[in-house]
Each structure stands twice: as C-alpha cells, then as structure tokens.
Image: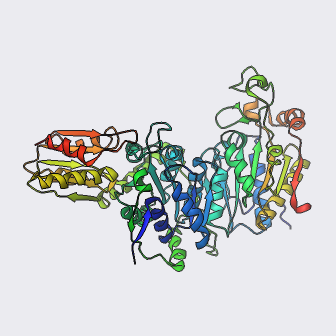
C-alpha cells in the first residue's frame, strides 16, 4: 500500500503551537516538503522570527536559529557567509519583516544574499494580540487601530513584493495565497522553486504567503479565508514578480 | 618579528586576522574607520568575509548568525554605534555565542563628539543591553596591548562561549605606535578551530544516522527553564571571575602615600605623573585594571599599603569606574575622583598637581 499522507522528515515530532485554523502549519509543511524533496535536510538551516512563528526553530528538523525581532535576514546573512556549504532560509511575519525589520529585508535582498525568505502576511500582529501591522488594510480594525486604519494618519499598507521588485539583485519574487487547496498547490510550486534556486546558489529568493488570523480577526477559519479573498487579494495581488530563472 | 609602526585601529584588525578571524561585519563610524577600512582591504586577501552592513543593528546580528555557526567573527564600532549593537549583544550573551566586539570610544552622550573618552564603562561592564548577562571587557592602554587583546579575546570567547568586548578609545585607535604581531594561525589551524563548537553550533549533518538538531536561541518561554538558564550563565560568569582577573601593578609598594586606579588611555597619563612625582621623592602606586570585567577588586584592596592616605581614581568620564573602586576599597581609606569629559584629555601636569595636593 502506498503511503500518501505522512509527516515530512524536515519537521520534528513537536506539535505546532498555532491556533486552530492558522495557516502557519501549512506554510511550514510546504517548506519541509520542498526541503525533503530536494534532499537538502542535512544541509539546510533556517531562522525563526519574533511573532507567532517564534517557535519555528523547534518545528524544523535541522539546525535552526532564533533571531531578534526583524533581524532574521541579517542573522541568515551571517550564517550563510560563515557556512557557505549550507542553505539558509528565514521565516518571517508581516510585523517582523515589513515594520521593525524593513532595513534588514531590503538590504539582504539588495545584496542578493544567497537565501530564501518566506514571508507570511496576515495583515496583523498575532502573537502580541492583534495590533496593527504594516500590511493592515485601510479601515481595518485592530487593537491599535480601534477606529480602523486611517491611511491619512498612518499611511497605506506596504506591498513588500512590489517594493523588493524595484531592486536589481533579487532572483525570484512571488506572492502566493494559502486560502484554498488550489492556492496551496500553487504555493508549493513557488516554495519548491525558491528552495531549488537556493540549492543552486542562484541568489535571493522571496515568497510571500497571503494568510489569515482567525483568532485576532475574530472570524472562524473558513470565514477568515473568505474575508482574505475578498479584502486582501485585491490589494495584495498574487503572482510572480520576478523569476530570473525563467528569463 | 620586526616591529611595525601602526595605528591601533589597524593593529587590532591585523591581529584579529592573524588570530583566525575570517568574518567581519561592521558599519562605518569615526574614530574607528581605519579598522573597517583595513578589514575591507585585507579580508579578501585571506579569503575572508568583509561585509559593510546596512546598520550597526544588522552588523551585530550578522555576527550572531556567524557566531552561531561556531566561526571566529568580529565587529567594531564607536560609542553611538555600540549603543545600537546592544540588542544583539544581549542576544549573543543569552544564546552563549563566542564573538568579539571592539569599541573605539568617543565622547557622549548622544552623538557627542569624535574625541577619545571613557564614557562607555557602565555600558560595557554593567549591562548595556537588556537582561542579566555579562561581557568579558578588556581595556588596552597601548597599541601593542590593543593588538594582543584581539587573540586573547577570541580565545576567551571560544573558551566561555561568551561575547568579549575590547574597550579602547579614539586615542588608541588613532595613535601610531610600534607593534609586534604574533605569528598568524595557519589555514589548517583556522579550519580546525570551529570543531570545538561541533556539539552545539549550526553545521551540516555529516554524522550519518546520528542526526543533530542544534538551536541557536535565547528564548525560554517557561520561567522555570529561563531561571535555570540565567543561573547557569551566572555559574559561568563566576568561573570567569575566578580565572580571568587581569591588572597591572605600577610602583605599588609599602612606601606609597597615594594609590591611583586608572584604566586604558587615562592610565598612561597617570603613569607619567607618577614618574614625575617619583623624581620629587613622592611615592605613588597605581593599579590598572587590564580587564575591567571581571574586575580586580582584591588586587586593589591588597595594594592599599600601610601609608596610603587616599585612593585616587582618574578617568576620562565622570567617575564610572569609581563605583567599582569604592567596592574594592570598602571604606578603608578615602577615595577621590577626578576626570575630564567631552573628549577633553587630561595632561600629566594636571594629574601631578592633583596628586601633589595629597601630600
């Protein structure tokens, strides 16, 4: 009998600590599958951020580092430079990557660092209890934008893929969604491509996942996905922004 | 090996390379620019990594990443830049990583100025970053000592898995003095070096079935576990306090009527004043802490001779080491302080005048 459902070797046996309906587990699994499929488990390492996925260093079944808030791309830079025979990725949320870590992500991308960045965008700070993120949508209510995000006061959400796409060095930039099974299949392809390019030493690869936060959005998991489809996807359009490998 | 005339900033960089440092991440700031520039020139010649980071914050986090891989890594900066690095230094201490940080101090607070000062003593020896941790802090007083400390700093960092700071200042960074370097480690020795960290560092899985899962981490969400972790850190620090006290005794004798305590650049000036007073038949001794953490409390207490009327502390700050001297003296004799700040450096004549008034 063929075994079609199993835990990837690149995930440890430690149960995820995420809320019910959270999509971090899906994103973790996609990365782990891609690492397994490309036979990189013994040469892979990653950097966990500050945020809901702060414990990601426990979940991936290879050496991992945990970074200060926003600093994962700098930490990964140091790791890759110290161990060029290894492959490194960062896993970061929207507050970590697009607010406190803006300088680190822009400059790692601009240097064309040999790393993959997996960016989970759910438009809110999850771990700290639902505060406004740099990707929070206009008029969206959070605990620190209780009257809705006022774009005249605090500006508009940052589209990170588009921002990084202005740089010359990045090798691959794609935004995918985790909102439907079909989307997840597409996301897997993007993750695999990023890991493959990483394996081949092509340069800086970046995959953004449009995700949800049922707990802090106050919606059940399915309604969260509907809300994201209706509100996030029109603003954060999925698609490939840059693929130097396909040129 | 022949002596070379060199600036302190360049000498410490050269010594670091000779000690096996092949990874250097930093951001430009005066008065340490010669250090980053030397690394930019020399690292490519030894197949090392030189990377000018986008910020001090990024530079120290690159150090965290490289140190997590068990490799000898260094960063350098000057006071305002060191403040920015403090977050990363706290993480490096928490995660127990070996790393060397050079601070070529300048005047503060804030942007201050670019002249030599010793105003970062508290920051270096009492914390700076958040949480309960300690840095080993070495304070050179000459270009030769600045260079020698590079290899000692890497050895101590490796030995204790702890960040080590070399606390110099703009005077030592900019000043040229003859310096003699130790023989450089060979490529084979440098390659061998990270293996001492194989049990914990990030590295490829090459052990066949015995697959490791190493975590470079300072997070312990369970308070009981974090308490244990911090207690373990402090056991290590107690060990460092036992083993790594380092100081110089200068003209300390039973004849001393005054005992001076000074560190780094300031100690050189005090030494000149002591030599002048000696000619006048006035006996003054000095204890110079070479490591300012761990601190030579006992050495200072023991150096207070039977005729010492006063312990005099001279610093290029408002009296930051003074607290430690008072702990050491424990009220046995009066402790006095005099210092200059803002990048203004006192002269031997001024120190001599202060000391003469004690007789």
Residue B133 position within the rendered picture, expressed as x and y whole percent measured from the top left: 43, 48
Quadrant of the image occupied by residue B43: bottom right
Towards the viewer: B24 or A35: B24
Q: Quadrant of the N terminus of chain B?
A: bottom left
Would residue B15 appear left or right of B329 to someone viewing this image? right
State the residue at coordinates (81%, 40%). A159
Would residue A4 appear left or right of A94 to someone viewing this image? right
Q: Quadrant of the C terminus of chain B?
A: top left
Would residue A155 appear left or right of B129 to someone viewing this image? right
Towards the viewer: A239 or B189: B189
Residue B14 position within the rendered picture, expressed as x and y whole percent measured from the top left: 49, 67
Answer yes or no: is residue A190 visible: yes
Residue A86 position within the rendered picture, expressed as x and y whole percent measured from the top left: 68, 67
Image position of B184 with respect to A242: above or below: below
Could you tell me how many numbered marks the image carries?
0
Answer yes or no: is residue A63 visible: no
Towards the viewer: A21 or A109: A109
Quadrant of the image occupied by residue A34: bottom right
Please say which color scheme the image uses: rainbow
State the residue at coordinates (37%, 65%). B144
Residue B250 position within the rendered picture, expressed as x and y whole percent measured from the top left: 20, 58
Towards the viewer: B221 or A87: A87
Residue furthest to the top in view is A147
């Amino acid at each position: 009998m063929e075994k079609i459902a199993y835990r990837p070797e690149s995930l440890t046996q430690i149960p995820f600590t995420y809320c019910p309906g959270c999509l971090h587990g899906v994103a973790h699994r996609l990365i782990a599958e891609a690492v397994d499929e490309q036979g990189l488990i013994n040469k892979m390492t990653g950097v966990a951020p500050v945020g809901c996925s702060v414990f990601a260093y426990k979940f991936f079944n290879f050496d991992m580092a945990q970074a200060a808030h926003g600093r994962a791309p700098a930490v990964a830079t140091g790791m890759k430079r110290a161990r060029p025979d290894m492959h490194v990725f960062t896993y970061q949320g929207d507050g970590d990557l697009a607010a406190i870590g803006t300088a680190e992500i822009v400059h790692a991308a601009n240097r064309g660092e040999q790393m993959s960045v997996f960016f989970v965008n759910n438009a809110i700070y999850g771990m700290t209890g639902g505060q406004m993120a740099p990707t929070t949508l206009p008029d969206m209510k959070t605990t620190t934008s209780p009257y809705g995000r006022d774009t005249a006061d605090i500006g508009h959400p940052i589209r990170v893929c588009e921002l990084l796409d202005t740089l010359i060095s990045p090798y691959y930039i794609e935004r995918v969604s985790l909102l439907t099974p079909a989307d997840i299949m597409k996301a897997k392809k993007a993750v695999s491509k990023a890991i493959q390019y990483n394996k081949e030493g092509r340069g800086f690869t970046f995959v953004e996942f449009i995700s949800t936060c049922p707990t802090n959005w106050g919606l059940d998991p399915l309604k969260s996905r509907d809300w994201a489809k209706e509100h996030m996807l029109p603003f954060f359009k999925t698609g490939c922004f840059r693929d130097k490998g396909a040129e | 090996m022949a002596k070379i005339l060199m600036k302190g900033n360049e000498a410490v960089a050269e010594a670091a390379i000779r000690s096996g440092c092949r990874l250097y991440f930093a951001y430009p700031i005066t008065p340490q620019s010669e250090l980053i520039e030397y690394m930019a020139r020399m690292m490519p010649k030894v197949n090392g990594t030189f990377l000018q980071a986008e910020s001090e914050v990024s530079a120290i986090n690159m150090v965290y990443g490289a140190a997590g891989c068990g490799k000898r890594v260094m960063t350098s900066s000057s006071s305002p830049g060191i403040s920015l690095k403090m977050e990363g230094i706290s993480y490096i201490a928490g995660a127990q990583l070996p790393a060397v940080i050079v601070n070529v101090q300048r005047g503060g607070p804030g942007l201050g100025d670019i002249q030599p000062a010793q105003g970062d003593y508290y920051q270096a020896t009492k914390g700076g970053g958040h949480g309960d941790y300690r840095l080993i802090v070495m304070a050179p007083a000459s270009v030769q000592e600045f260079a020698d400390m590079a290899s000692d700093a890497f050895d101590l960092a490796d030995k204790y898995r702890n960040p080590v700071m070399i606390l110099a200042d703009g005077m030592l960074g900019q000043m040229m003095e003859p310096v003699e370097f130790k023989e450089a480690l060979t490529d084979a020795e440098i390659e061998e070096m990270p293996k001492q960290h194989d049990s914990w560092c990030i590295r490829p899985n090459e052990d066949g079935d015995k697959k490791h899962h190493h975590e470079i981490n300072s997070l312990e969400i369970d308070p009981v576990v974090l308490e244990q972790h911090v207690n373990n850190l402090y056991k290590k620090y107690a060990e460092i306090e036992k083993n790594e006290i380092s100081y110089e005794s200068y003209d300390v004798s039973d004849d001393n009527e005054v005992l001076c305590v000074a560190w780094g650049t300031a100690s050189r000036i005090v030494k000149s004043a002591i030599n002048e007073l000696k000619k006048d038949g006035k006996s003054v001794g000095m204890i110079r802490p070479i490591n300012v953490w761990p601190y030579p409390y006992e050495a200072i207490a023991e150096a207070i001779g039977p005729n010492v009327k006063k312990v005099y502390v001279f610093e290029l700050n408002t009296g930051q080491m003074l607290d430690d001297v008072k702990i050491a003296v424990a009220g046995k004799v009066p402790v006095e302080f005099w210092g200059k700040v803002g990048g203004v450096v006192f002269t031997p004549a001024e120190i001599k005048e202060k000391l003469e008034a004690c007789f």
